[in-house]
Image (cartoon, rainbow, N blue to C red):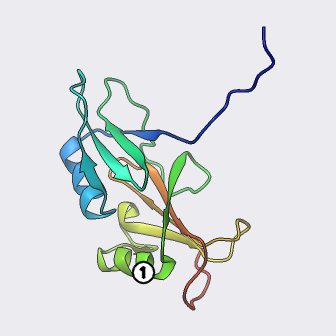
């Protein structure tokens, strides 16, 4: 027996369960702007996307776990993507119809400009209510804190 640690290099990919692949692909390609990449011929439906130097895998599972009926909650399971410009990301999402306190929870965003992390964060949900954090190294604009 050895006391050696698991030598982790990095995260390889994040897998997200989706119920409707066409709808999910529309969101990940046209809202987040991710580029679809080749995927092996698995026995189940899905799609793979490039996220920087890592992958995001969408999976249509037989018995997935979804956040059905839940609103946007940054303390629930989520994954985060880092963007180069916080303000450009926010403007982009607003142009796509995403706003704080939007009447449609799937179009609502939660902003944390000056939180405990030290970097600004935007939270949104995909069509299956998977929570996605979009963050940047720093806030590159002026604006109020919106909760």
Residue sitting farthest toward the right: 3
The residue that label 1 is drawn on is 88
Residue 98 in the image: state x and y as whole percent.
37, 72
Identified at 78% across, 13% down, the residue is 2
Q: Is residue 28 left or right of residue 140?
A: left
Identified at 41% across, 50% down, the residue is 129
Q: Is residue 24 visible?
A: no
Q: Is residue 40 above or below residue 70?
A: above
Q: Is residue 32 left or right of residue 134?
A: left
Q: Dot 1: what SS?
A: helix
Identified at 31% across, 57% down, the residue is 34
Front position in the image: 120 or 128: 120
On-image quarter of the C terminus: bottom right
Residue 79 in the image: state x and y as whole percent.
51, 50
Q: Is residue 39 above or below residue 139?
A: above
Identified at 38% across, 70% down, the residue is 103
Among the 4 quarters of the image, the one containing residue 65: top left
């Amino acid at each position: 027996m050895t006391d050696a640690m698991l030598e982790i290099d990095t995260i390889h990919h994040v897998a997200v369960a989706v119920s409707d692949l066409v709808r999910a692909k529309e969101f990940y390609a046209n809202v987040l702007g991710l580029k679809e990449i080749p995927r092996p011929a698995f026995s189940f439906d899905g799609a793979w996307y490039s996220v920087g130097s890592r992958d995001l895998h969408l999976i249509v599972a037989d018995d997935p776990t979804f956040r059905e009926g839940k609103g946007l909650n940054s303390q629930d399971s989520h994954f985060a993507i880092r963007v180069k410009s916080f303000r450009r990301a926010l403007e982009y999402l607003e142009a796509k119809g995403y706003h704080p306190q939007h009447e449609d929870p799937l179009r609502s965003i939660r902003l944390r400009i000056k939180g405990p992390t030290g970097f600004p964060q935007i939270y949104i949900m995909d069509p299956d209510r998977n929570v996605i954090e979009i963050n940047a190294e720093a806030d590159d604009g002026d604006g109020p804190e919106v909760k």
